Image (spheres, helix red, strand yellow):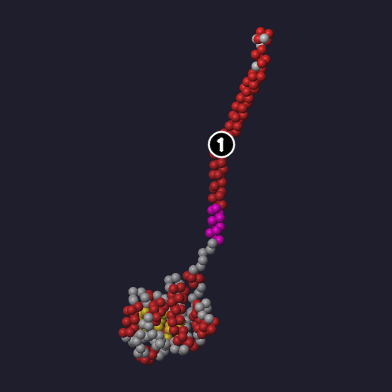
């Protein structure tokens, strides 16, 4: 049988195997190519962009940065122009002409301060009549000449005063330095009257209480804060007080009056509320604006 088939029998019988081998060999290069193309695509996705492109982007950014800075600088300049500096008390007072104080100024200050602290009926009680006020300084008087005008019988009044821990005349000012200045200006008015400085700088409250108890004091010159402390500790009695003179028109280096300084203003209103307004309503105390 084998001889009849000849030598080529294996070629026909093995055709199927040979074709399979050929098909496998044909598939392998195609698969390799597909894999290469796929991996090539993956590499192209994962690969970083060339340096030239980076330079272009950075150049574009560099071009944009100064423009943005210019815009931001422009915005800042416009914002600074829009923001106007708030006017201080000094600016307002410097632009306004100095006017002498009047009783209405004091009355308005009292009503504004107590408007949210007292009832309507209590606010009506705080209103002072014109008879409670002395003549106001028209900015032409010195302290001595002003006191001579409002207290023409001072020599007689000071002789009648014999109570300790009290004064007949009380002058209220904004600072210790101003207190000393005003005491110097009293030389032509006070006569034989004893004057006591009542401020907090370098002087303790206890020392001032002892000085008031030690002898008879006719005139007291001081700051609102220390005067309030003395009245609260009963070191200063206002039962004998007849004249309250306010250093209303004087201005410091910043052109501020006594009532323009927040701390002094609050202490001053406390002082008025410590019995002085009540004494004015009872016609015992009269107020003068120097």
Q: Where, quadrant-wise, is the N terminus in this rendering?
A: top right
Q: 10 Å neighbourhood of mark 1: few (<14), some, or many (≥20)?
A: few
Task: Please tell me whether the stretch drawn in magenta is mainly helix, strand or loop.
Answer: helix
Image quadrant where residue 158 sits: bottom left
Q: Position of residue 284 (x, y in %)?
A: 44, 89
Using the image as rendered, state which of residue 162 and residue 193 is in the foreground: 162
Q: Is residue 134 left or right of residue 22?
A: left
Rendered location of residue 221, percent (x, y): 38, 80
User: Looking at the image, can residue 28 be seen?
Assistant: yes
Q: For the magenta stretch, what is the residue range?
A: 72-82
Counting from the top left corner in percent of width and height, residue 38 is at 60, 32
Say which residue appears at 49% left-offset and 72% top-offset.
93
Write down the residue under mark 1. 46
Quarter of the image for the C terminus: give it: bottom left
Q: Decide if residue 27 is on the left or right side of residue 151.
A: right
Q: Is residue 23 above or below residue 7?
A: below
- Asked which secondary structure carries label 1, the reply is helix
Q: Does the magenta stretch include residue 73?
A: yes
């Amino acid at each position: 049988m084998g001889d009849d088939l000849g030598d080529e029998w294996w070629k026909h019988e093995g055709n199927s195997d040979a074709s399979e081998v050929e098909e496998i060999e044909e598939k392998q290069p195609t698969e390799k190519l597909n894999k290469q193309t796929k991996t090539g695509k993956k590499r192209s996705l994962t690969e970083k962009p060339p340096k030239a492109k980076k330079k272009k982007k950075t150049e574009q950014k560099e071009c944009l940065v100064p423009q943005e800075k210019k815009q931001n600088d422009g915005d800042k300049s416009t914002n600074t122009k829009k923001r106007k500096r708030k006017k201080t008390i000094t600016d307002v007072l410097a632009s306004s002409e100095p006017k002498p104080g009047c009783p209405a100024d004091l009355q308005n200050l009292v009503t504004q301060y107590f408007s949210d602290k007292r009832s309507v009926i209590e606010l009506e009680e705080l209103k002072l009549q014109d008879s409670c006020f002395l003549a106001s300084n028209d900015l032409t008087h010195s302290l001595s000449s002003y006191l001579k005008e409002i207290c023409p019988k001072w020599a007689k009044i000071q002789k009648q005063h014999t109570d300790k821990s009290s004064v007949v005349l009380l002058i209220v000012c904004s600072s210790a330095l101003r207190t000393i200045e005003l005491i110097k200006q009293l030389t032509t008015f006070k006569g034989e009257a004893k004057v006591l400085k009542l401020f907090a700088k370098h002087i303790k409250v206890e020392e001032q209480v002892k000085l008031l108890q030690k002898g008879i004091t006719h005139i007291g010159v001081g700051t609102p804060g220390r005067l309030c402390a003395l009245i609260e500790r009963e070191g200063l009695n206002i039962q004998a007080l007849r004249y309250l003179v306010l250093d209303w028109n004087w201005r410091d280096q910043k052109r501020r009056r006594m009532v323009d300084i927040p701390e002094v203003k609050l202490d001053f209103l406390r002082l008025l509320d410590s019995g002085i307004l009540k004494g004015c309503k009872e016609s015992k105390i009269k107020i003068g604006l120097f």
